[in-house]
Image (cartoon, rainbow, N blue to C red):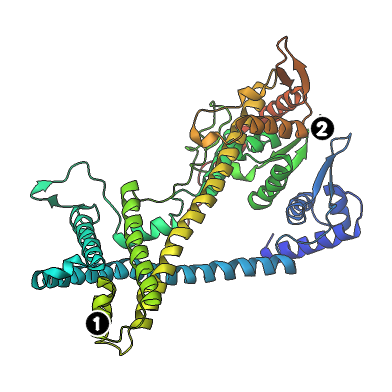
Amino acid sequence: MTAVTDRTAYRKVVETLKRRRKGLTAADLAAATALPLAAAREQLSRAADEFRGRLKVTESSEILYEFPQGFTSRYTSLGARLGRFMDKFVRVGAAFLSWLFKAWILVMLLGYFALFMLIALAALFLSVAGNSSNSNSRSRSHSGGGFILASHVFDLIIRLWFYSELTKSLEGSYRGRPVRNQRRSQPLHRAVFSFVFGEKDAVDAEAAERRALIAYLCANRGIISLPEYMALTGAGPLEAEERILGLCADAGGYPEATEEGTIVYRFQDIMRRADKGDRSFAGEGLSAPLTRLRSFSANSKTMNAWFGIINSVNLLFGGYFFYQALTTGVIRSTEHLQASPRIYGITYALATALTDNPQPVLLIGLGLVPLVFSFFFWVIPALRYIRLGRQNQGIKRRNLRKIGFRKIWEKLRGVSAADIDNPAPECRPEPLAAEQEKIIAEMGAYSQPEVEADESGKIFYNFTELEREKKVLASSRAAVNSADFDLGKVVFDSGQ
């Protein structure tokens, strides 16, 4: 079936579904549209995904498709298109603003730090020169305070730039000795961005989950049940049903009701593969890849601490100049200059070479701007840290759900909430006990368990309906002949 006829058939199917208020089977659809039964079944799966269809099994084991939410498309409706446009607009805009902000951060962090260090060195030099020519100046508390501050700043810059890991050689040698056990670091500008914005995940969790699903299908003759899908993805019953219908639309699968009334999902086309080496689930039971927790940044704690120190220096000097520009203000005479705080007075005198009135320059350029920058430099990582904690909590919850659904599916009888546990940090959301109970309840929403208690009052659950479904699933798989999926010998080669 070509792409054009496929689209035509799908439009015909949707129009037919809109006219049918009650549920219908694939045979009903084939009769109403004159499509082949296989094509009608395929298009029904697509429609169920796009319009959030629901599946019901009749006593004769036929599947009825219903669309209680109407026919507002998840993909082509005005709202969906507008949502995609806004998402793209926000992503592009955020990327552009992020690039500008990153450039601003680099210039501000290092540029202002270097400028303040030069000011501190100049103040130290002139203070020492002034003290040596006029010993009485050391009796002034404000001059002595300025000298002590400049001395501390000078000591800080010496320690920072000559002894910190920002200036150590990461690839060569240090003082003639090879650097051992030294982790290769990323460039400084990337380290700054990593501190502020974090790092993108190196592993695509969604792609890894999709590969696990395909591997599981290939190892189990192209058949999967909803509880197995839940165990592989951590999705609850409603979400799992919606997502597995989407997978059917993407991978040519379709739901099928067995004679016992159990719905299974067949993906026969995905079995016709030349590569059979990744069928890793065969003989190993049901398992799923766990998602790793996201880290705050790729930097070491020491590196992030130094960025904090640099920003603190900018914050200190910015606050100092902002305060002095407001309180000391314009210096109009030599006496006023000598009575002014030493660093502010020296900077003011140097700035007169650039402008007749340096006070606004010091107030805004050396005061307000560094203060605003330092604020954002702290606030953005702080907000990201809070958001990261929530994301990691979600990752832990999802991982525990995968483990919990798998253990229920494997054990079936005598299941307790305490069985749903894993010592790995990636699988321990808080509060753990509440999440364990919630997993039992979610599987119970799909298949009602029998509840019993022992003498100590501990609650156990017996999923007898799931046990029956598991037996039916095994029979369905046993009825599939794996030889039907063999590609056979090559009978034509375009290169020959």
Image quadrant containing the N terminus: bottom right
- The quadrant holding residue 310 is bottom left
Q: Position of residue 85 (x, y in %)?
A: 63, 70
Q: Which is more toward the observer, 266 or 291?
A: 291
Q: Secondary structure at mark 1?
A: helix
Residue identifier under label 1: 335
Q: Which is more toward the observer, 291 or 367?
A: 367
| 361 vs 174: above or below | below
Image quadrant containing the C terminus: bottom left
**At 35% from the left edge and 61% from the top edge, which residue is drawn?**
311
| 324 vs 242: above or below | below
Mark with earlier residue (1, 2): 2
**At 90% from the left edge and 60% from the top edge, which residue is drawn?**
19
Does residue 24 appear to the left or right of 475 in the view shown? right
| Amino acid type indicated by mark 1 | Glu
Mark 1–mark 2 Cα distance, whole angstroms, equals 98 Å
Does residue 21 appear to the left or right of 152 in the view shown? right
Instruction: Report the disc number at residue 496.
Output: none
Q: Position of residue 484 (x, y in %)?
A: 62, 37
Does residue 165 appear to the left or right of 226 in the view shown? left
**At 55% from the left edge and 36% from the top edge, which residue is drawn?**
288
How dense is the environment of label 1, judged by Cα within 10 Å: few (below 14), some, or many (20 and up)?
Answer: few
| Amino acid type indicated by mark 2 | Gly
Asked if residue 326 shows in the view, the reply is yes
Instruction: Report the disc number at residue 261.
Output: 2
Q: Marks 1 and 2: which is nearer the front?
A: 1
**At 23% from the left edge and 81% from the top edge, which residue is drawn?**
350
Asked if residue 486 shows in the view, the reply is no
| 4 vs 42: above or below | below
Q: Secondary structure at mark 2?
A: loop
Q: Residue furthest bottom?
A: 356
